[in-house]
Amino acid sequence: MSANPLNNNQLQELAPTLFTSEPHFEVSEKYHFIPTIDVIEEIKANNWYPVSVSQADVRDENKQGYQQHCVRFRHFEDLLNPGENAVELLLFNSHDRSKSFSISAGIYRFVCANGLVVSDSVFESYKIKHLGDRDNDVANAVAKITAVKEKLLDKITTLSNIQLSQIEKQSFAKLSVPLRFEEHLQIDINDLLVPLRDEDYKDDLYTTLNIIQENLIRGNISGFNKDTGRKFTSKEIKSISTDTYVNKGVWDIAEKIASIKEPQYQIAA
């Protein structure tokens, strides 16, 4: 994750598929192709700048340059004056129809250089269908994310003020296990609650959310296969789809816990 916006040369070096100029040959004639770089420029025009990019690995060489990719953007104001957390805009796309064009919201936590993806129950993802029209999909999506930016930061404050007991933290971890591990893979749920830095030795819901998410995503969790008896150690998640799925799932659980601990808490942003 860059502290400064990535320029187009850096974007092309990190993810050439952003600059692909035509769709994969297998898509139908009805497929409306939009180069990702065109949408990036549109988003930049709305004061959000790219700070991170990733593209999926491909097994089929014919899909190289057309695979799924994700670009994270940060608002101009947050680049000027970074806080402890920043609301980010996430752009997803592919050029082979494996992933539709969409814009979602995320949270970046500077203390651990950790990027969360906000659950759809909190903030709806917006599909992108066209560019340049009066009711432009990109402009509408960016405007809606910008409008709820402060509300999302208020959510973080609320989650940070909700304290969890050890039993509640263990329940959170237990519910998170299926997001990453299949039923036949046994782990110690307490391993998901081990902080990776001194700043995270806290009992609030937001910190617990980040600890669990980071341990699920970054891996190094040991366990054993109940079917074979063999031991394993989880690896870092590098799949864009799996990363997003785990992120949204953990955030969803945190939202449910907040609504139980604080009945007046509103799940919708």
Image (cartoon, helix red, strand yellow):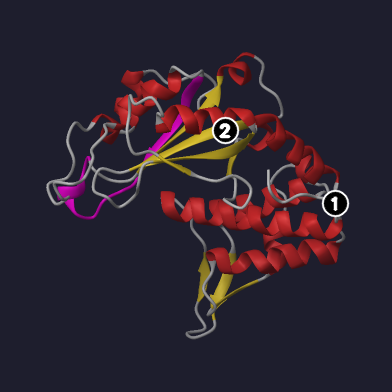
Q: Position of residue 120 (x, y in %)?
A: 57, 50
Q: Position of residue 190 (x, y in %)?
A: 73, 65
103 lies left or right of 115: left
Per the image, label 1 sits on a secondary structure element best described as: loop
Give the image quarter of residue 88. Answer: top right
Q: On the image, numbered disc 2 is attached to which residue?
A: 145
Question: From the viewer's perspective, is 93 left or right of 181?
Answer: left
Q: Which residue is mark 1?
A: 264
Q: Which one is nearer the viewer's eye here, 210 or 100?
A: 100
What's the residue at 48%, 57% (across, down)? 235
Question: In the rendered view of the protein, which quadrant contains the C terminus?
Answer: top right
* C-beta proximity under 8 Å, tags 2 and 1: no
Mark 2 is surrounded, within 10 Å at the Cα level, by few (under 14), some (14 to 19) or many (20 or more) other residues, namely many
Residue neighbourhood size for the residue with mark 1, other residues' Cα within 10 Å, grouped as few (<14), some (14–19), many (≥20): few
Q: Residue at x 46, y 31 (%)?
A: 52
Q: Is residue 192 above or below residue 123?
A: below
Q: Secondary structure at mark 2?
A: helix
